[in-house]
Image: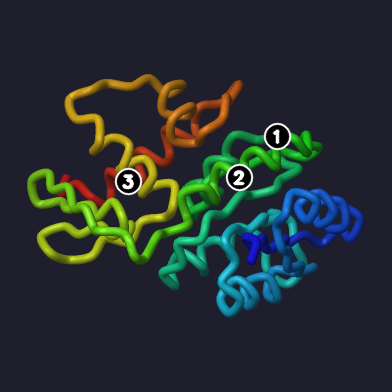
Amino acid sequence: MGKRVLIVEDEQAIVEILKFNLRKEGYETLEALDGRTGLELARTQDPDLVLLDVMLPEMNGFDVCGALRRGGSEVPIIMLTAREGEEDKVFGLETGADDYITKPFSMRELLARVKANIRRRTIDMGAQRSVISVGDLAVNIDSYGVTKRGAPVELTQKEYDLLRFLILSPGKVFSREELMENVWNYDYFGDMRTVDVTVRRLREKIEDD
């Protein structure tokens, strides 16, 4: 069975373009034309990734993203936005989105981001577990589990990917560009706030102060 992408977008023409190109790449798709339906599908259909528009009827994309994260969902979320303002992009990341892409977008770039965000979601349940501990933090590399003093820490997919990369490279310092290349798995040009916000969210969850 192919990986499943949920498209939450109110413009039918965009939905059809996304659906055509994703299916051509081997993905299954689910579609929702409003925020409430998208939230319900994300909760009940277990997609491998959500493409989430910001401006939606019934419930906007920021609220959908926030509701999923508060409910414990770790599904990768890419925000689709026509807004170019930095505040909107940062707010989307702060609500728990893993990435954003601004309309109009290159289909090649969007597909690359979808592939990169899904890549490490697949877990081999039969693999031998490997746990790396640093101080009071323990990261299970195979099950994607993170605990602090024995208590589970809820991370988004991208927060986990970042933590895993850093914990496997102890004592090394990385630039934003290096983190983008190694954690996000694609060359990124322009605004590096995606890295800044994800680092800050991760630190808030794993650090005492």
Dot 1: element = helix
Seen at 17% across and 47% down, the residue is: 132
Identify the residue under disc 1: 109
| Cα–Cα gap, marks 2 and 3 | 22 Å
Place of residue 4 in the rendered image (x, y in percent of width and height, measured from the top left): 65, 63
Q: Residue at x 23, y 38 (%)?
A: 167
Of circles 1 and 3, which is in front?
A: 1
The residue located at (44%, 33%) in the rendering is 195
In the picture, which quadrant includes the N terminus?
bottom right
User: Mark 2 or mark 1, which has the lower sequence index?
Assistant: 1
Asked where in the image residue 134 lies, by quadrant, the reply is top left
Q: Earlier in the sequence, mark 2 or mark 3?
A: 2
Q: Amino acid at mark 2?
A: Lys
Q: Nearer the viewer, mark 2 or mark 3?
A: 2
On the image, which quarter does residue 35 sit in?
bottom right
Q: Quadrant of the C terminus?
A: top left
Q: CA distance from mark 1 to mark 3?
A: 26 Å
Q: Is residue 88 visible?
A: no
In the image as oriented, which residue stretches furthest toward the right?
13
* Residue type, mark 1 in image: Glu
